[in-house]
Image (tube, grey):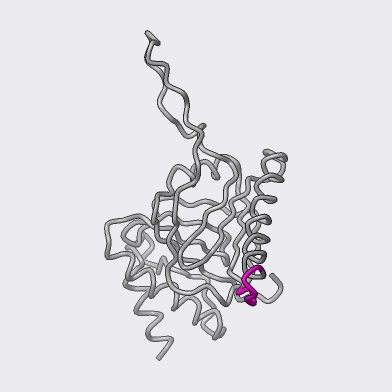
């Protein structure tokens, strides 16, 4: 039953290709029950999102790829250099980004006689933390070699948010409920590209890896 459902969902989501092959999750091992169930869960969420005219994110930890998609079609792909995920069992369904990454906007000089440049991709942050609903902390880090200082600052900010959640829980004498936290390391250019693409309330689905070694 699960196998039939998976194949059906793949056929519904996969866009026609020149080679005639299935385009969605071709790496699924049909003999791996956990991998099959995870792919089915993600595809079920995608079926719902693909019926709406809004873009969404699919973070595929199996293939190390961030997909920016619309109507089930890939609009842009971002390679993931490295990732780490805590409390993976708490991830289910579709998350939504509460607010887009903070942007340092240029000051406009109204007295300037020449046309001033609008905000561009170069103005986007290279490291940032996004909070989602249901609870998920998504931290985007540019590769350390691209910007070591930014990598350290963003990492410490993410750690501070986690510690603050625990402190609040202890202050009200309540056992802290761990929330999932996902850290993604991508190139500086791609981090800025992702920041440009993310909007408030943007849907996000995570395909977890079932590889116990990770």
Q: Provide residue 70's location: percent of width, then percent of height.
A: 34, 56
Give the farthest residue toward the top: 113
Work out whether 16 lies above or below 42.
above
* Residue nearer the viewer, 209 or 140: 140
Is 172 covered by the magenta stretch? yes
Name the quadrant containing residue 62. Answer: bottom right
Left or right: 62, with 17 as reference point = right
* Residue nearer the viewer, 213 or 168: 168
Which residue is at 38% across, 75% downward?
A: 44
Left or right: 197, with 51 as reference point = right
Which residue is at 51% across, 57% downward?
A: 131
Which residue is at 51% across, 56% downward?
A: 66
Q: Provide residue 3's location: percent of width, then percent of height.
A: 43, 86
Which residue is at 65% across, 61% downward?
A: 162
Locate the C terminus by quadrant. bottom right
Left or right: 120, with 160 as reference point = left
Name the quadrant containing residue 5. Answer: bottom left
Work out whether 127 lies above or below 89.
above
Magenta-highlighted residues: 171-177
Left or right: 195, with 51 as reference point = right
* Residue nearer the viewer, 18 or 99: 99
Report the magenta stretch's main SS: loop
């Amino acid at each position: 039953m699960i196998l039939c459902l998976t194949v059906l969902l793949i056929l519904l989501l996969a866009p026609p290709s020149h080679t005639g092959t299935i385009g969605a999750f071709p790496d699924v091992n049909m003999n791996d029950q956990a991998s099959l169930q995870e792919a089915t869960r993600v595809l079920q969420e995608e079926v719902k999102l693909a019926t709406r005219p809004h873009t969404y994110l699919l973070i595929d930890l199996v293939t190390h790829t961030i997909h920016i998609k619309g109507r089930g079609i890939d609009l842009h792909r971002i390679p993931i250099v490295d990732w780490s995920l805590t409390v993976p069992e708490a991830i289910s369904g579709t998350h939504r980004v509460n607010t887009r990454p903070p942007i340092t906007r240029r000051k406009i000089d109204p007295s300037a006689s020449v046309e001033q440049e609008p905000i561009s991709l170069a103005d986007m942050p290279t490291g940032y933390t996004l909070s989602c609903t249901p609870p998920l902390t998504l931290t985007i880090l540019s590769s350390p070699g691209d910007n070591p200082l930014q990598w350290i600052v963003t990492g410490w900010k993410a750690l501070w948010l986690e510690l603050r959640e625990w402190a609040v829980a202890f202050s009200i004498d309540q056992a802290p409920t761990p929330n999932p936290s996902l850290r993604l390391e991508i190139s500086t250019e791609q981090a800025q590209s992702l920041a440009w693409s993310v909007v408030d309330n943007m849907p996000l689905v995570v395909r977890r890896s079932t590889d116990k070694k990770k």
